[in-house]
């Protein structure tokens, strides 16, 4: 569904994230805001905005709401391979490939912008800082996938869940979606189980352990990190792979 241009302020999440990755020039910010205004869309929860096998002819930027990337086996087993949060790109440069190799589904109501290929390429050609920011976004996504591979292959259940909580918190902070030590966490236990490779029962037991230790509070779709340093220690977590804290 097309969104009215009065929601242009939602572009601030994208501007904040990209500025955290690579400082944008004033011209780059203005050009990006205009491109976003021209392509605002809305989707309800549980909608596929891209499916495996689809052809893609542009780039989608998330302005508000949560989505997740996933792959599903023929027998219905699903693996969530990443969450996509406000300010992030769903699929920068994926239009260079023939088709999507995974699906993207909304976890909540979402407002996003779709920038068509020709418009996007013109934008990058005219604004070097924007081209660098989109490349950084792509590289950081690859780094996130490496961390998720370590999560599934080497971290035990408590470390996996604690690591995911740390990552979500750190990804939301630069775009202004953390309030004090709390952030929205509108993810079902089934989704969280599919992201961490755990059964729902094992996941629930792990969350209870993190709660009992006083590290987190998870209530009414809100995550509160009571002791971030201790949570990072429990997860063997370092935010350096997110590249969100530039020197100087």
Image: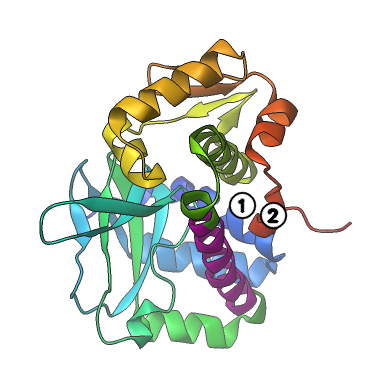
Above or below: residue 111 compared with residue 183: below
Observer-nearest of 63 and 75: 75
**Magenta region includes residue 132:** yes
The quarter in which the C terminus is drawn is bottom right
Taking the image as drawn, is residue 179 in sight? yes
The residue furthest right is: 248
Q: Which image quadrant is residue 97 in? A: bottom left
Tell me if label 1 and label 2 are in contact, CB under 8 Å. no
Residue in the image at 53% along x and 68% along y: 142
Q: Position of residue 115 (x, y in %)?
A: 36, 71
Q: Position of residue 206 (x, y in %)?
A: 46, 25
Observer-nearest of 30 and 161: 161
Q: Which residues are magenta?
A: 130-149
Q: Residues within 10 Å of mark 2 (few under 14, many from 20)?
A: some
Q: Residues within 10 Å of mark 1 (few under 14, many from 20)?
A: some
Q: Position of residue 232 (x, y in %)?
A: 68, 35
**Number of the label disc, if any, that sits on residue 244:** 2
**Number of the label disc, if any, that sits on residue 16:** 1
For marks 1 and 2, the one nearer the N-term is: 1
């Amino acid at each position: 569904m097309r969104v009215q241009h009065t929601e242009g302020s939602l572009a601030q999440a994208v501007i904040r994230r990209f500025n955290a990755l690579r400082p944008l020039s004033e011209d780059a910010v203005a050009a990006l805001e205009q491109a976003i205004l021209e392509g605002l869309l809305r989707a309800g929860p549980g909608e596929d905005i891209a499916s495996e096998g689809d052809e893609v002819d542009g780039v989608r930027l998330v302005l508000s709401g949560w989505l997740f990337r996933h792959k599903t086996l023929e027998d219905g087993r699903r693996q969530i391979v990443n969450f996509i949060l406000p300010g992030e790109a769903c699929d920068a440069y994926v239009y260079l490939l023939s088709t999507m190799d995974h699906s993207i589904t909304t976890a909540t109501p979402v407002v996003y912008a779709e920038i068509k290929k020709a418009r996007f390429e013109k934008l990058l050609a005219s604004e070097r800082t924007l081209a660098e920011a989109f490349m950084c976004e792509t590289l950081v996504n690859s780094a996130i996938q490496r961390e998720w591979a370590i999560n599934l292959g080497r971290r035990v259940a408590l470390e996996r869940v604690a690591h995911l909580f740390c990552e979500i918190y750190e990804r939301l902070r630069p775009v202004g979606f953390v309030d004090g030590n709390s952030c929205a966490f509108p993810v079902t236990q089934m989704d969280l189980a599919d992201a961490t490779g755990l059964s729902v029962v094992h996941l629930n037991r792990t969350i209870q352990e993190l709660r009992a230790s006083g590290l987190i509070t998870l209530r009414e779709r809100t995550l509160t990190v009571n002791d971030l340093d201790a949570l990072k220690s429990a997860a063997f977590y370092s935010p350096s792979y997110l590249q969100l804290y530039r020197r100087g």
